[in-house]
Amino acid sequence: MEFQFSNRVLKLKPSAIREIFKYASDPSVISLSAGNPAPEAFPSKEIAEISERILAQRPIDALQYSITEGYEPLREYLTDYMKKMHGIGRDFDNILITSGAQQVMDLAAKSLCNEGDVVICEAPSFIGSLNTFRSYNTRLRGIPMDSDGMNMEELEKALKEESNVKFIYTIPNFQNPSGITMSWAKRKQLYALAKKYHVLILEDNPYGDLRFHGEHIEAVKSLDDAGLVLYAGTFSKIISPGMRVGYAIGPKELLQKMIVCKQGQDVHTNIWSQMVCHEFMTRYNFDEHLKKLQEIYLKKSAIATGALDKYLIPKVTYNPIEGGLFLWCTLPDGVDMLDFCKQAVLRKVCVVPGNAFLTDDSAPSQSFRINFSTPTDGQLLKGIQILGTLANEMITN
Ligand SMILES: Cc1ncc(COP(=O)(O)O)c(C=O)c1O
Protein backbone atom coordinates (compact mmCIF):
# COMPACT_ATOMS: atom_id res chain seq x y z
CA MET A 1 0.00 0.00 0.00
CA GLU A 2 1.28 3.45 -0.84
CA PHE A 3 0.54 5.69 2.12
CA GLN A 4 -0.48 9.31 1.67
CA PHE A 5 1.11 10.86 4.73
CA SER A 6 -0.20 14.11 6.18
CA ASN A 7 1.51 17.39 5.30
CA ARG A 8 2.33 17.66 8.98
CA VAL A 9 4.67 14.65 8.97
CA LEU A 10 5.54 14.39 5.29
CA LYS A 11 8.92 16.04 5.68
CA LEU A 12 9.86 14.22 8.89
CA LYS A 13 12.69 11.83 8.14
CA PRO A 14 14.99 9.76 10.26
CA SER A 15 18.20 11.78 10.27
CA ALA A 16 21.35 10.47 8.62
CA ILE A 17 22.94 10.80 12.03
CA ARG A 18 20.75 7.97 13.22
CA GLU A 19 23.01 5.65 11.28
CA ILE A 20 25.54 6.23 14.02
CA PHE A 21 23.03 5.47 16.78
CA LYS A 22 22.33 2.05 15.28
CA TYR A 23 25.71 0.88 16.48
CA ALA A 24 25.02 1.92 20.05
CA SER A 25 22.90 -1.20 20.66
CA ASP A 26 25.79 -3.52 19.69
CA PRO A 27 26.94 -4.91 23.07
CA SER A 28 30.60 -4.70 22.02
CA VAL A 29 30.26 -0.93 21.47
CA ILE A 30 30.86 1.46 24.38
CA SER A 31 27.90 3.79 24.18
CA LEU A 32 28.62 7.31 25.37
CA SER A 33 25.63 8.43 23.33
CA ALA A 34 22.61 7.61 25.50
CA GLY A 35 20.92 9.97 27.95
CA ASN A 36 19.80 7.38 30.45
CA PRO A 37 20.16 7.65 34.21
CA ALA A 38 22.83 5.47 35.83
CA PRO A 39 21.39 2.00 36.47
CA GLU A 40 22.54 2.23 40.11
CA ALA A 41 20.46 5.41 40.52
CA PHE A 42 17.12 3.61 40.38
CA PRO A 43 15.42 3.13 43.78
CA SER A 44 14.40 -0.41 42.74
CA LYS A 45 13.97 -1.84 46.26
CA GLU A 46 11.71 1.03 47.31
CA ILE A 47 9.68 0.81 44.08
CA ALA A 48 9.18 -2.92 44.66
CA GLU A 49 7.99 -2.29 48.26
CA ILE A 50 5.64 0.48 47.21
CA SER A 51 4.21 -1.52 44.31
CA GLU A 52 3.56 -4.51 46.53
CA ARG A 53 1.79 -2.31 49.07
CA ILE A 54 -0.30 -0.54 46.43
CA LEU A 55 -1.36 -3.75 44.71
CA ALA A 56 -2.19 -5.43 48.05
CA GLN A 57 -4.06 -2.50 49.59
CA ARG A 58 -5.48 -0.44 46.70
CA PRO A 59 -5.49 -2.63 43.59
CA ILE A 60 -8.55 -1.04 42.03
CA ASP A 61 -7.15 2.50 42.34
CA ALA A 62 -3.96 1.36 40.62
CA LEU A 63 -5.56 -0.72 37.88
CA GLN A 64 -8.68 1.23 36.98
CA TYR A 65 -8.96 4.12 34.48
CA SER A 66 -8.21 7.47 36.05
CA ILE A 67 -8.64 11.17 35.30
CA THR A 68 -6.62 13.09 32.69
CA GLU A 69 -5.41 15.79 35.10
CA GLY A 70 -3.49 13.20 37.09
CA TYR A 71 -3.55 11.36 40.44
CA GLU A 72 -4.99 13.92 42.83
CA PRO A 73 -2.69 13.23 45.83
CA LEU A 74 0.37 13.60 43.54
CA ARG A 75 -0.99 16.81 41.99
CA GLU A 76 -1.64 18.30 45.44
CA TYR A 77 1.69 17.22 46.87
CA LEU A 78 3.70 18.44 43.87
CA THR A 79 1.87 21.78 43.77
CA ASP A 80 2.78 22.34 47.40
CA TYR A 81 6.32 20.99 47.06
CA MET A 82 7.20 23.09 44.00
CA LYS A 83 5.80 26.21 45.61
CA LYS A 84 7.62 25.68 48.92
CA MET A 85 10.91 24.40 47.53
CA HIS A 86 11.22 26.45 44.33
CA GLY A 87 8.69 29.29 44.43
CA ILE A 88 6.96 27.77 41.40
CA GLY A 89 3.21 28.13 40.86
CA ARG A 90 0.82 31.02 41.58
CA ASP A 91 -2.95 31.30 41.83
CA PHE A 92 -3.31 31.61 38.06
CA ASP A 93 -1.40 28.32 37.53
CA ASN A 94 -2.53 24.72 37.47
CA ILE A 95 -0.73 21.37 37.34
CA LEU A 96 -1.15 18.51 34.88
CA ILE A 97 0.56 15.14 35.29
CA THR A 98 1.94 14.00 31.93
CA SER A 99 3.56 10.94 30.41
CA GLY A 100 7.06 12.31 30.88
CA ALA A 101 8.23 15.84 30.17
CA GLN A 102 8.28 14.94 26.50
CA GLN A 103 4.50 15.05 26.51
CA VAL A 104 4.54 18.59 27.90
CA MET A 105 6.45 19.70 24.81
CA ASP A 106 4.02 17.86 22.57
CA LEU A 107 0.88 19.18 24.27
CA ALA A 108 2.24 22.73 24.29
CA ALA A 109 3.02 22.60 20.58
CA LYS A 110 -0.27 20.89 19.79
CA SER A 111 -2.24 23.49 21.75
CA LEU A 112 -0.41 26.57 20.48
CA CYS A 113 1.29 26.06 17.12
CA ASN A 114 -0.12 26.47 13.65
CA GLU A 115 1.87 25.44 10.62
CA GLY A 116 4.65 27.98 10.00
CA ASP A 117 4.63 29.41 13.54
CA VAL A 118 8.03 30.04 15.04
CA VAL A 119 9.49 28.30 18.08
CA ILE A 120 12.64 29.92 19.43
CA CYS A 121 15.10 27.36 20.76
CA GLU A 122 18.58 27.32 22.18
CA ALA A 123 21.12 26.16 19.62
CA PRO A 124 22.01 23.41 20.29
CA SER A 125 18.98 21.90 22.03
CA PHE A 126 17.33 18.58 22.95
CA ILE A 127 16.54 16.50 19.83
CA GLY A 128 13.34 15.03 21.28
CA SER A 129 11.80 18.46 21.74
CA LEU A 130 13.03 19.81 18.40
CA ASN A 131 11.46 16.83 16.62
CA THR A 132 8.20 17.34 18.47
CA PHE A 133 8.08 21.00 17.42
CA ARG A 134 8.99 19.98 13.86
CA SER A 135 6.12 17.49 13.79
CA TYR A 136 3.71 20.45 14.02
CA ASN A 137 5.41 22.06 10.99
CA THR A 138 6.73 24.92 13.04
CA ARG A 139 9.80 26.87 12.01
CA LEU A 140 12.63 26.57 14.52
CA ARG A 141 14.82 29.59 15.14
CA GLY A 142 18.00 28.73 17.02
CA ILE A 143 19.66 31.20 19.38
CA PRO A 144 23.38 30.68 19.94
CA MET A 145 24.51 29.87 23.46
CA ASP A 146 27.03 31.80 25.58
CA SER A 147 28.72 30.13 28.52
CA ASP A 148 25.88 31.41 30.75
CA GLY A 149 22.91 30.59 28.53
CA MET A 150 21.16 31.93 25.44
CA ASN A 151 22.65 35.04 23.87
CA MET A 152 20.15 37.72 24.86
CA GLU A 153 20.99 40.15 22.04
CA GLU A 154 20.31 37.41 19.50
CA LEU A 155 17.13 36.49 21.33
CA GLU A 156 15.84 40.06 21.25
CA LYS A 157 16.78 40.34 17.57
CA ALA A 158 14.74 37.18 16.86
CA LEU A 159 11.79 38.47 18.87
CA LYS A 160 11.86 41.72 16.88
CA GLU A 161 12.19 40.00 13.51
CA GLU A 162 9.70 37.17 13.89
CA SER A 163 6.04 38.07 13.98
CA ASN A 164 4.50 34.73 14.97
CA VAL A 165 6.66 33.34 17.78
CA LYS A 166 4.60 30.88 19.84
CA PHE A 167 7.13 30.26 22.58
CA ILE A 168 10.77 30.36 23.62
CA TYR A 169 11.98 26.89 24.58
CA THR A 170 14.75 26.74 27.18
CA ILE A 171 16.52 24.09 29.25
CA PRO A 172 18.12 26.34 31.86
CA ASN A 173 19.94 23.75 33.99
CA PHE A 174 22.83 21.59 32.71
CA GLN A 175 21.36 21.83 29.27
CA ASN A 176 21.05 18.77 27.07
CA PRO A 177 23.34 18.66 25.13
CA SER A 178 25.71 21.55 25.98
CA GLY A 179 25.76 21.16 29.78
CA ILE A 180 25.38 24.97 30.05
CA THR A 181 23.46 26.51 32.96
CA MET A 182 21.69 29.83 32.47
CA SER A 183 22.81 32.45 35.00
CA TRP A 184 20.29 34.15 37.29
CA ALA A 185 20.94 37.46 35.51
CA LYS A 186 20.04 35.89 32.17
CA ARG A 187 16.95 34.18 33.58
CA LYS A 188 15.73 37.62 34.64
CA GLN A 189 16.61 39.08 31.23
CA LEU A 190 14.81 36.22 29.48
CA TYR A 191 11.70 36.79 31.56
CA ALA A 192 11.82 40.55 30.94
CA LEU A 193 12.06 39.95 27.17
CA ALA A 194 9.15 37.51 27.27
CA LYS A 195 7.12 40.19 29.04
CA LYS A 196 8.20 42.94 26.64
CA TYR A 197 7.31 40.91 23.54
CA HIS A 198 4.31 39.03 25.06
CA VAL A 199 5.75 35.59 24.34
CA LEU A 200 5.39 32.41 26.38
CA ILE A 201 8.47 30.65 27.78
CA LEU A 202 8.52 26.85 27.85
CA GLU A 203 10.97 26.00 30.63
CA ASP A 204 12.11 22.36 30.53
CA ASN A 205 13.92 21.34 33.70
CA PRO A 206 14.63 17.59 33.83
CA TYR A 207 18.11 17.99 35.36
CA GLY A 208 17.62 20.75 37.97
CA ASP A 209 17.89 18.31 40.93
CA LEU A 210 21.10 16.80 39.59
CA ARG A 211 23.44 19.63 40.61
CA PHE A 212 26.76 18.40 41.97
CA HIS A 213 28.80 21.65 41.91
CA GLY A 214 27.96 25.29 42.63
CA GLU A 215 24.86 27.02 43.92
CA HIS A 216 21.26 26.27 43.00
CA ILE A 217 19.67 28.87 40.69
CA GLU A 218 15.92 29.37 40.87
CA ALA A 219 13.76 28.59 37.87
CA VAL A 220 12.56 31.23 35.40
CA LYS A 221 9.08 30.14 36.47
CA SER A 222 9.77 31.45 39.97
CA LEU A 223 9.80 34.97 38.44
CA ASP A 224 6.48 34.48 36.73
CA ASP A 225 4.02 37.04 38.07
CA ALA A 226 2.15 37.40 34.78
CA GLY A 227 1.42 33.81 33.64
CA LEU A 228 4.07 33.74 30.91
CA VAL A 229 5.91 30.52 31.77
CA LEU A 230 4.93 26.91 31.20
CA TYR A 231 7.19 24.74 33.36
CA ALA A 232 7.96 21.10 32.49
CA GLY A 233 9.17 18.78 35.25
CA THR A 234 9.79 15.04 35.27
CA PHE A 235 10.61 12.05 37.46
CA SER A 236 12.57 10.46 34.61
CA LYS A 237 16.02 11.46 35.78
CA ILE A 238 15.34 11.24 39.51
CA ILE A 239 13.19 8.10 39.87
CA SER A 240 12.79 6.24 36.56
CA PRO A 241 12.23 7.19 32.90
CA GLY A 242 10.45 3.87 32.25
CA MET A 243 7.65 4.89 34.60
CA ARG A 244 6.87 7.89 32.33
CA VAL A 245 5.73 10.45 34.88
CA GLY A 246 6.26 14.16 34.23
CA TYR A 247 4.24 17.29 34.86
CA ALA A 248 3.39 20.73 33.57
CA ILE A 249 2.81 23.78 35.77
CA GLY A 250 1.40 26.72 33.88
CA PRO A 251 -1.46 29.16 33.32
CA LYS A 252 -4.85 27.48 33.87
CA GLU A 253 -6.24 28.47 30.49
CA LEU A 254 -3.35 26.87 28.63
CA LEU A 255 -3.40 23.75 30.78
CA GLN A 256 -7.12 23.35 30.16
CA LYS A 257 -6.45 23.09 26.43
CA MET A 258 -3.52 20.73 27.00
CA ILE A 259 -5.78 18.47 29.09
CA VAL A 260 -8.24 18.19 26.20
CA CYS A 261 -5.34 17.36 23.84
CA LYS A 262 -3.99 14.75 26.27
CA GLN A 263 -7.37 13.03 26.40
CA GLY A 264 -6.97 12.22 22.73
CA GLN A 265 -3.39 11.01 23.17
CA ASP A 266 -3.33 8.64 26.13
CA VAL A 267 -6.40 9.44 28.30
CA HIS A 268 -4.16 9.73 31.38
CA THR A 269 -0.66 9.03 32.61
CA ASN A 270 -0.07 5.52 33.97
CA ILE A 271 -1.86 5.67 37.30
CA TRP A 272 0.23 2.99 39.02
CA SER A 273 3.41 4.94 38.19
CA GLN A 274 1.87 8.15 39.55
CA MET A 275 0.96 6.39 42.81
CA VAL A 276 4.51 5.06 43.14
CA CYS A 277 6.01 8.53 42.59
CA HIS A 278 3.66 9.99 45.19
CA GLU A 279 4.50 7.36 47.82
CA PHE A 280 8.19 7.62 47.07
CA MET A 281 8.13 11.38 47.62
CA THR A 282 5.98 11.27 50.75
CA ARG A 283 6.95 8.06 52.61
CA TYR A 284 10.67 7.87 51.90
CA ASN A 285 13.49 10.33 52.37
CA PHE A 286 13.33 12.12 49.03
CA ASP A 287 16.06 14.65 49.93
CA GLU A 288 18.44 11.83 50.85
CA HIS A 289 17.63 10.11 47.57
CA LEU A 290 18.45 13.27 45.60
CA LYS A 291 21.72 13.62 47.53
CA LYS A 292 22.60 10.04 46.63
CA LEU A 293 21.99 10.76 42.94
CA GLN A 294 24.11 13.91 43.11
CA GLU A 295 26.94 11.84 44.63
CA ILE A 296 26.66 9.19 41.91
CA TYR A 297 26.85 11.81 39.15
CA LEU A 298 29.59 13.81 40.85
CA LYS A 299 31.73 10.66 40.87
CA LYS A 300 30.90 9.70 37.30
CA SER A 301 31.43 13.20 35.95
CA ALA A 302 34.80 13.36 37.72
CA ILE A 303 35.86 10.11 36.05
CA ALA A 304 34.77 11.47 32.66
CA THR A 305 36.41 14.90 33.02
CA GLY A 306 39.55 13.31 34.51
CA ALA A 307 39.83 11.04 31.46
CA LEU A 308 39.10 13.94 29.08
CA ASP A 309 41.81 16.04 30.75
CA LYS A 310 44.25 13.15 30.49
CA TYR A 311 43.55 11.90 26.97
CA LEU A 312 41.91 14.70 24.94
CA ILE A 313 42.92 18.10 26.29
CA PRO A 314 44.18 20.34 24.65
CA LYS A 315 43.17 18.92 21.28
CA VAL A 316 39.52 18.66 22.26
CA THR A 317 37.92 21.11 24.70
CA TYR A 318 34.76 20.63 26.76
CA ASN A 319 32.24 22.90 28.49
CA PRO A 320 32.56 23.02 32.29
CA ILE A 321 29.51 21.48 33.99
CA GLU A 322 27.83 21.85 37.37
CA GLY A 323 25.34 19.00 37.04
CA GLY A 324 23.27 16.87 34.68
CA LEU A 325 24.40 13.94 32.59
CA PHE A 326 26.32 15.36 29.60
CA LEU A 327 29.62 16.77 28.45
CA TRP A 328 29.84 18.85 25.30
CA CYS A 329 33.18 18.46 23.57
CA THR A 330 34.53 20.56 20.71
CA LEU A 331 37.10 19.64 18.07
CA PRO A 332 39.37 22.29 16.57
CA ASP A 333 38.35 23.92 13.26
CA GLY A 334 39.43 21.95 10.24
CA VAL A 335 38.75 18.54 11.81
CA ASP A 336 35.75 16.79 10.30
CA MET A 337 33.48 16.20 13.30
CA LEU A 338 31.19 13.68 11.56
CA ASP A 339 34.19 11.74 10.37
CA PHE A 340 35.55 11.77 13.94
CA CYS A 341 32.25 10.30 15.22
CA LYS A 342 32.22 7.67 12.46
CA GLN A 343 35.82 6.69 13.13
CA ALA A 344 34.97 6.44 16.84
CA VAL A 345 32.16 4.01 16.02
CA LEU A 346 34.56 1.88 13.97
CA ARG A 347 36.68 1.71 17.14
CA LYS A 348 33.54 0.75 19.04
CA VAL A 349 32.83 4.01 20.88
CA CYS A 350 29.60 5.85 20.15
CA VAL A 351 29.14 9.60 20.79
CA VAL A 352 26.48 11.93 19.35
CA PRO A 353 27.51 14.39 16.61
CA GLY A 354 26.70 17.97 17.57
CA ASN A 355 24.70 18.85 14.47
CA ALA A 356 22.01 16.38 15.58
CA PHE A 357 21.05 19.00 18.17
CA LEU A 358 20.83 21.99 15.84
CA THR A 359 17.62 23.50 14.55
CA ASP A 360 19.10 22.88 11.08
CA ASP A 361 20.90 19.57 11.39
CA SER A 362 22.68 20.07 8.08
CA ALA A 363 24.50 23.10 9.57
CA PRO A 364 28.15 22.60 10.48
CA SER A 365 29.17 21.74 14.02
CA GLN A 366 32.53 20.99 15.58
CA SER A 367 31.05 19.48 18.74
CA PHE A 368 29.90 16.09 19.99
CA ARG A 369 28.08 15.00 23.13
CA ILE A 370 29.31 12.50 25.69
CA ASN A 371 26.98 10.98 28.26
CA PHE A 372 28.68 9.91 31.48
CA SER A 373 25.74 8.52 33.46
CA THR A 374 24.97 5.30 31.58
CA PRO A 375 28.38 3.66 30.95
CA THR A 376 30.20 1.87 33.76
CA ASP A 377 33.26 3.61 35.20
CA GLY A 378 35.47 1.18 33.27
CA GLN A 379 33.62 1.84 29.99
CA LEU A 380 33.91 5.59 30.53
CA LEU A 381 37.66 5.41 31.01
CA LYS A 382 38.21 3.04 28.12
CA GLY A 383 35.83 4.89 25.78
CA ILE A 384 37.43 8.27 26.42
CA GLN A 385 40.91 6.79 26.08
CA ILE A 386 39.93 5.46 22.63
CA LEU A 387 38.59 8.92 21.69
CA GLY A 388 41.90 10.38 22.84
CA THR A 389 43.93 8.06 20.61
CA LEU A 390 41.67 8.92 17.70
CA ALA A 391 41.99 12.67 18.36
CA ASN A 392 45.76 12.33 18.44
CA GLU A 393 45.72 10.59 15.09
CA MET A 394 43.26 13.00 13.43
CA ILE A 395 44.59 16.23 14.92
CA THR A 396 48.22 16.47 14.10
CA ASN A 397 49.15 19.96 15.25
C1 LIG B 1 16.01 18.32 27.98
C2 LIG B 1 15.09 17.15 28.05
N1 LIG B 1 13.77 17.37 28.08
C3 LIG B 1 12.89 16.36 28.14
C4 LIG B 1 13.33 15.05 28.17
C5 LIG B 1 12.28 13.96 28.17
O1 LIG B 1 12.11 13.50 29.45
P1 LIG B 1 10.94 12.51 29.84
O2 LIG B 1 11.55 11.17 29.99
O3 LIG B 1 10.44 13.07 31.13
O4 LIG B 1 9.91 12.55 28.78
C6 LIG B 1 14.69 14.77 28.15
C7 LIG B 1 15.16 13.39 28.14
O5 LIG B 1 16.30 13.06 27.95
C8 LIG B 1 15.59 15.86 28.08
O6 LIG B 1 16.92 15.68 28.06
Image: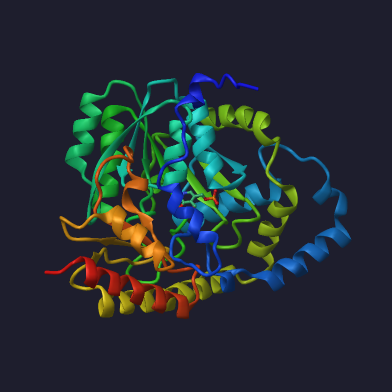
Where does residue 329 sit, x and y in percent of width and height? 28, 62
Which residue is found at the position 49% from the left and 58% from the top? 23
Where does residue 292 sit, x and y in percent of width and height? 52, 75
Where does residue 37 sit, x and y in percent of width and height? 53, 64
Question: Can residue 173 be seen at all in this image of the molecule?
Answer: no
Where does residue 386 sit, x and y in percent of width and height? 35, 74
Which residue is found at the position 29% from the left and 48% from the top? 187
Q: Which quadrant of the rendered structure holds the C terminus?
A: bottom left
Compared to residue 103, the image places residue 49 above or below, namely: below
Compared to residue 331, the image places residue 194 above or below, namely: above
Residue placed farthest to the left in the image? 397
Which residue is found at the position 54% from the left and 33% from the top? 107
Which residue is found at the position 67% from the left and 31% from the top? 263
Between 368 and 213, the one lying in front of the other is 368
Q: How many marks?
A: 0
Question: Can residue 9 be seen at all in this image of the molecule?
Answer: yes
Compared to residue 364, the image places residue 326 above or below, namely: below
Between 200 and 29, the one lying in front of the other is 29
Q: Which quadrant of the rendered structure holds the N terminus?
A: top right
The picture quadrant where one finds residue 304 is bottom left
